[in-house]
Amino acid sequence: MLSIHAIPDAFSKSECERVIATISNSPTDEALLVGRNKNHNLRKAELVWTDNLAGMEWVMERLIELVRLANRDQFGFDLREFSESPQVAIYKSSESGHFAWHSDIGGGPVSRKRKLTLVLQLSGSDTYDGGNLEIMPGAQILTANRTQGCVSIFPSFTLHQVSPVKSGTRYSMTVWAHGPAFR
Ligand SMILES: O=C(O)CCC(=O)C(=O)O
Ligand SMILES: [Fe+2]
């Protein structure tokens, strides 16, 4: 079934903390492209694009391998490349961080080619309340595993949301795999 593919122990706690530290220690100048979404009703989060961020290569290598295995074992999509920078999102309770229901397939030349979405839970599950990644592959809503280091992979056309963070801060990392149109 084309649902969520979960890998609970994809990264260790200390590896997740290392990623958060790498993000946090980076200069937050324009070159790093720390973005803020314009439509806060849809999404409230700070974004760090990790493409050119030193110290993230090993993370990307592992994520690419996890996508390859998930696609081989579960999805069987025609995937060709990772055409976009991965992003780390920071959802703060002080700002009611959230991301309303959406699909990741957009209308742009690159976002229309998204086929698989990977989300890595970087924060310890007891360090924040709310902030659940919820996925709707069919009539029912599934809540993604909150375990720190868990990777969830699902088709990018699947509706999903991040419910508002009620306390603490949630860090997650998102990567998309791209390929030719579905047919
Ligand atoms: O932060 C998450 O868990 C999901 C992020 C997301 O849906 C996205 O970046 O498109
Ligand atoms: Fe998304």
Image: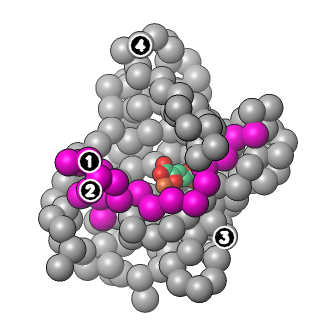
Position of 134 relative to 120 (above/below): below
Res 72 visible: no
Mark 1 vs 4, N-terminal side: 4
Q: Nearer the viewer, residue 113 or 123?
A: 113
Do the numbered discs 3 and 4 sit on residues whose CB atoms are within 8 Å? no
Q: Which mark is residue 30?
A: 4
Decide which of tag 4 and tag 2 comes sooner along the chain.
4
| Earlier-in-chain disc, 3 versus 1 | 1
Say which of marks 3 and 1 sits in front. Answer: 1
Whole-number angstrom distance, CA of label 2 to CA of label 1: 6 Å
Q: In the drawing, what numbered circle is on residue 112?
A: 2
> In this view of the protein, which residue sits in the foreground, 168 or 39?
39
**Which kind of residue does numbered mark 4 sit on?**
Glu
Tag 3 or tag 2, which sits nearer the N-term? 2
- Disc 2/disc 3 C-alpha distance (Å): 25 Å
Instruction: Specify the quadrant that holds the N terminus.
Output: bottom left
In the rendering, at what x and y percent does residue 2 appear? 41, 82
Residue that extends furthest to the bottom in the rendered view of this protein: 1
Q: How many marks?
A: 4
- Which residue is pictured at 61% across the width and 54% down the height? 100
Residue at the spot of label 1: 108
Tell me whether the residue at label 2 lies in contact with that at label 1, contact meaning CB atoms closer than 8 angstroms.
Answer: yes
What residue range appears in magenta? 96-115
Foreground tag (4 vs 2): 2
- Tell me if 3 is positioned left or right of 165 in this view: left
- Residue toward you, 94 or 119: 94
Question: Mark 3 sits on what residue?
Answer: 143
Q: Residues within 10 Å of mark 2 (few under 14, many from 20)?
A: some
